Amino acid sequence: MITEKPGKYLGNNLGQSFLASPLKAPLKSWALVPAFVIVAVSVGFVTGLFQFAWLDSPITPLLPLILFVFPSLLEEAFFRGILIPRNVLAAGHAKAAWSVVISTLIFVVWHPFNALAFNPTAIPLFLNPWFLIIVGAMGVTCGYAYVLSRSIWVPVIIHWAAVTVWVLFLGGRNLVLEL
């Protein structure tokens, strides 16, 4: 539970997480990445969400930078950096696990809400249950990485790498081009 004033909480939580280097994160912060890749690749190829395809667009060279800011940096700052207390492990493993679960559930729900409220072209994708399974796996992976590393940069890198590979090489929906 957040007991600090909002400004102090943001400074102590999100602000400090921006200062923590991903290079100093313990290796176990990255431990769920292989499991996430297996889930995402299996679900993605079996369901047709993934297919080998190079994105051919005039903005392809800029997309890694764009995808770094949104969705990666902005979503991770909110769903991990704000929703999960940076020092949650001090309250115990159960509290940390619940924080990751709650953050992940909100992250998953955000995608259909985003499509329905702001981006109707994303409705078929963001309401696809298979896509939401991949989103859930990413949420757990990024939440776990944040809790163990206490750095926002670890989940940002994971999120960015996954979305960039999907959009550039696996036929992912480039929602930036659709806006």
Image: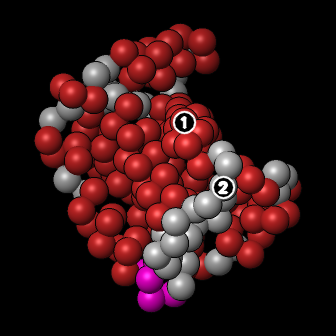
- Label 1 environment density (alpha carbons within 10 Å; few <14, some 14–19, many ≥20): few
Please indicate whether residue 146 sits to the left or right of residue 53 in the image. left
> Residue 146 at what x, y percent from top left?
35, 38
> Residue 161 at what x, y percent from top left?
41, 49
Please indicate whether residue 108 sits to the left or right of residue 153 in the image. right
Q: Which mark is residue 57?
A: 2
Mark 1 lies on a secondary structure that is helix
Which badge, 1 or 2, is on the more N-terminal residue?
2
- Residue at image coords 24%, 62%: 34
Residue indicated by mark 1 = 65
| The furthest residue to the left | 27
Query: Is 128 located above or below residue 47 in the figure?
Result: above
| The furthest residue to the bottom | 46
Q: Name the amino acid type tagged 2.
A: Ser
- Residue at image coords 49%, 52%: 164
Residue range in magenta is 43-47
Would you say residue 127 sits in the magenta stretch? no
The answer to the question of whether label 1 and label 2 lie on touching residues, with beta carbons closer than 8 A, is no
Query: Is 152 located above or below residue 3 in the figure?
Result: below
* Residue 92 visible here: no
Q: CA distance from mark 1 to mark 2?
A: 15 Å
Q: Name the amino acid type tagged 1.
A: Leu
- Residue at image coords 77%, 69%: 123
- Residue at image coords 74%, 75%: 124
Mark 2 lies on a secondary structure that is loop
From the image, state whether disc 1 or disc 2 is nearer to you: 2
